[in-house]
Amino acid sequence: MGILSIANGCDMLRRARERIVPSLPAGDNVLEESPFAEQEGDTMTALLLSCCLTAAGAPLPAKGPVMVLAGSPEYRKLALAETTTDGVIERISAGSRWAYRLKTGNLAPPPAKGRAPCLMVYAPGKAHLLEPFIGKRVWATGKVDRVEAGVQADGQMWLARIEPWSVVRPTPDARGVFARSAWHPNTTLPIRPSYSVIRDGAELARLMRIKGESASDTATTLMARRLGVTGIDWKKHMLVSISAGLKADADRLTVTSAAVRDGTLIVAYRLSPASRGGGFGYPVETVLVNRFSGLVRVSPRPTASAREERKSRP
C-alpha cells in the first residue's frame, strides 16, 4: 500500500472517529483519564494506528534499542532508580482507549498473590513506537512507579527504551554481571587464589587449549553455551574467571559486584559455606561483564554465613 493510500485511509478513520466518539454516553469511558492509556487517541485512533502500521509492515528494529522517553525532561526529573527487565508487550483495552503493559515474571519483589505479574507501560504519545513490539518478548528499561489503587498491576514503568529480547541482557544486572558459569580455565586448579581476564577469543582458545584456524570462534561458541547466552561480543564484553584456590568448608564462589572505581574495575566475590558439612573445595566462577581496557582487581569479601548466602544468591 502506498503512502498516499495510507494517508487517505487514516483521514477516513479520523472522520469516522469524530462522528462516533462524541456519541458515547457519559460514564462509558471509566478509564479515560487513566495515566496508562495512550493519551493522544482512543480506540478508533489506536485502530487507525494499527491499520497503518500493518500496512507499512511495522518491522522490528534491526538492532539496538528504540528510545521512548529516554532523555525527556519528565523522565530525567523522575527520582526513581532505572531498571531493566524482560517480558512481553501487550495491548489492552482501557475503556475507550488502548493501554500497554509489560507481562513479566521477573518482578522484584515478586507480585502479591492474586495480582497480575505485569507492569503498566507509561509512554504517552509513543504508541507508534510500541506497536511493532506487541506480542513479542522484549527488554524494557525504565523507572518503575506505584500504580493507582484498583489497577491490577504491580507498578507502572516510565519506559525509557525498548528492544527485541536476546539471551544476553542489554545491560548488566545489579551486580554488574551479564551471565555466569562455574568454569575456570585451568584443568588442574591452583591451590592459591587466582584470576584471569579474557578479552578476546584467541586468549580464550589458548586457555581452553583449543587449536586450529577456527580456534577463536570455537572457544567463543563453547563458552557462550556454558554461560547460557547466544554469543559473546568481544567488542562489548569480556570474561573474568576467578578461583579461590583450595578452601576448607567453602564450595561456592559468587561474584557480588563488578564496578569501575577510580579508573580500576573492582570485581568482588564472596565464598559460601559448604552445603554438606566439612571438606575441601575449589570454588570458581567465570562472569561475563562489560569490556574494560584498564586495570582489573579482584577483591574477596568475608565468607557469608549460610543464612546470608541464601539471600545473596543470584
Image: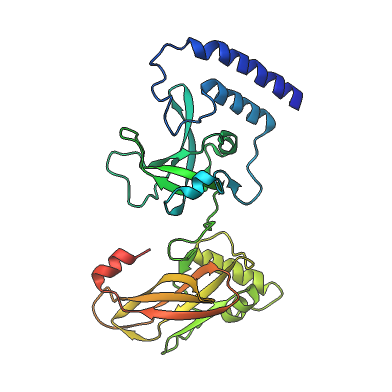
User: In this rendering, does residue 2 appear at all?
Assistant: no
The quadrant of the image that shows the N terminus is top right
Locate residue 110, reporting x and y percent. Answer: 32, 49
Q: In this orientation, which residue lies closer to the viewer: 12 or 81?
A: 81
Q: Quick check: 211 left or right of 166?
A: right
The quadrant holding residue 214 is bottom right
Locate residue 9, reporting x and y percent. Answer: 68, 19
User: In this rendering, does residue 208 appear at all?
Assistant: yes
Q: How is the image coloured?
A: rainbow
Q: In this orientation, which residue lies closer to the viewer: 90 or 213?
A: 90
Instruction: Tell which residue pokes out farthest to the bottom in this image.
Output: 191
| Residue drawn at the location 46% of the way across and 12% of the way down | 24
Q: In this orientation, which residue lies closer to the viewer: 89 or 74?
A: 74
| Residue drawn at the location 56% of the way across and 39% of the way down | 133
Q: How many marks?
A: 0
| Residue drawn at the location 42% of the way across and 72% of the way down | 255
The quadrant of the image that shows the C terminus is bottom left
Q: Quick check: 279 left or right of 129?
A: left
Is 159 above or below relative to 1? below
Locate residue 80, reporting x and y percent. Answer: 42, 51
